[in-house]
Amino acid sequence: MHDMTGGHDVKTGAMVVLPDAEAIAQHMAKWLTGQALAKKDGPFVLALSGGSTPKRLYQILASDAYRDRFPWARTQFFFGDERFVPPGDPASNYHMVETEMLAHVPVPAENVHPMPTSGDPAQAAAKYQAELEKVYGATTLEPGRPLFDVVMLGLGDNGHTASLFPRQPVLEERKLWVSTCVPDDAPHTRLTLTYPAIHSSRHVVFMLAGAAKRAAFAKVRAGDPAEPASHITTEGELIWLMDTAAAGQ
């Protein structure tokens, strides 16, 4: 275990390299369940990500092996980002998580916090920040008191993570916890957690699978400032959970 007081970034975070995407999902299911069960002082607060590797994780958590073990009632489920589409849209991260996991497990409805995706995007972002503030119990992030226990992240070929896309104003956001992003190289307006919100975490876990991720990972691991994911930090521990293809091994 790393020294939790020092904090980590993408260059210092531990790398866990496994054979393939299935192994990543199985490892994460086991680790995440352990973390959730170990949290006794308040709710286990989780920021979920979309994507194919997390999708498999959600299926595993909803399976017989985990459904009765995971502490659903003590976990608060938030989202790291969301496309500004209706909740039933195939492009919705919420829709995927609901279909693969939430619909099949005994999670109280009030523990699930989808990002709002109607009306004015900036107002929707403010509304989501208010939900986070309610769970956190304060309107200002305090060092040493993380907002999230675990933030799950992926990595796009263009170096984006969550919906922190290259060249967008959200990369400069230092006050808000949730903001909007309109990428110039991908469809849909997005809502996303910001760098300061992600930093206020006990663990940040990047899940990467496949050779297509190799180039972006190499740049981010080297700290290339042009890649939005290079600027991710955490108060706690940063973990790269990868397969051999993504790691270039």
Image (tube, helix red, strand yellow):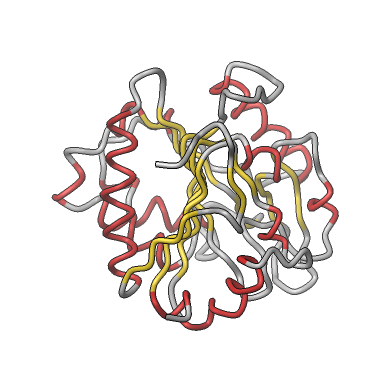
In the rendered structure, the answer to whether residue 66 lies left or right of residue 237 reads: left
User: For residue 174, what is the image quadrant?
Assistant: top right
Viewer-closest of 232 and 182: 232
Viewer-closest of 179 and 7: 7
The answer to whether one can see residue 94 in this image is: no
Q: Position of residue 244 (x, y in %)?
A: 39, 77
Q: Quadrant of the N terminus?
A: top left
The answer to whether one can see residue 164 in this image is: yes
Name the residue at 15% across, 50% down.
65
In the rendered structure, the answer to whether residue 246 lies left or right of residue 179 reads: left
User: For residue 84, what is the image quadrant?
Assistant: bottom right
Rendered position, 170 above or below 39: below
Name the residue at 54% across, 45% down.
79
Q: Position of residue 159 (x, y in %)?
A: 67, 69
Name the residue at 68% across, 32% down.
127
In the rendered structure, the answer to whether residue 32 lies left or right of residue 173 reads: left
User: For residue 56, what is the image quadrant?
Assistant: bottom left
